[in-house]
Amino acid sequence: MTAATDTASQMIREMRAAAGLSQAELARRAGLTRSVVNAYEHGTRQPGADALARIAAAAGMQLSFAPRVAAVDPVRAGRLLEQVLGLAEALPHKPSRSLGFPGLHRPAAA
């Protein structure tokens, strides 16, 4: 078995268990035979994306794909923040008395 087969078979077993269905009932709802669902669950047969989507729908779930988001390494993020703040402090800075925004004026009373 490959990692992909292990993942697919585990996913199908977990979906079926979460839905509380037997292999026969899951197969009936997905329009497959029980022997095919059994082969998928045991990794002796590899399901295609369409079969996985049908099995998920039969279990009351939705199969979807999302981009992977890399985990943030807090130590590296802290070092980068320190570097950015250090660079910001090194920039020349001349305080300004005003921010350059127009003042707020109240409308004249009628």
Image (spheres, grey):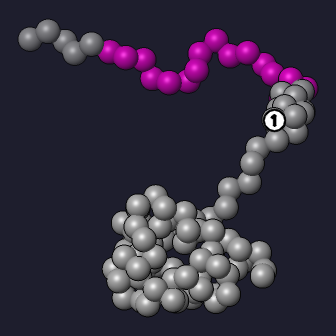
Type of amino acid at the residue the image marks with label 1 = Pro
Which residue is identified by label 1?
A: 74
Task: List x then y, in percent, for residue 81.
Answer: 82, 32
Q: Is residue 51 visible?
A: no
Vertical arrangement, residue 109 with respect to residue 75, above or below = above
Vertical arrangement, residue 110 with respect to residue 59, above or below = above
The residue drawn where x is 41% and y is 61% is 20
Vertical arrangement, residue 62 with respect to residue 84, above or below = below
Q: Secondary structure at mark 1?
A: helix
Question: In the image, which residues are magenta?
Answer: 87-105
Outermost residue to the top: 109
Q: Residues within 10 Å of mark 1 (few under 14, many from 20)?
A: few
Of 16 and 3, nearer the camera is 16
Is 17 situated left or right of 104 in this image?
right
The residue drawn where x is 46% and y is 58% is 18
Q: Is residue 48 visible?
A: yes
Q: Magenta span has 94?
A: yes
The residue drawn where x is 54% and y is 63% is 14
Of 38 and 1, nearer the camera is 38
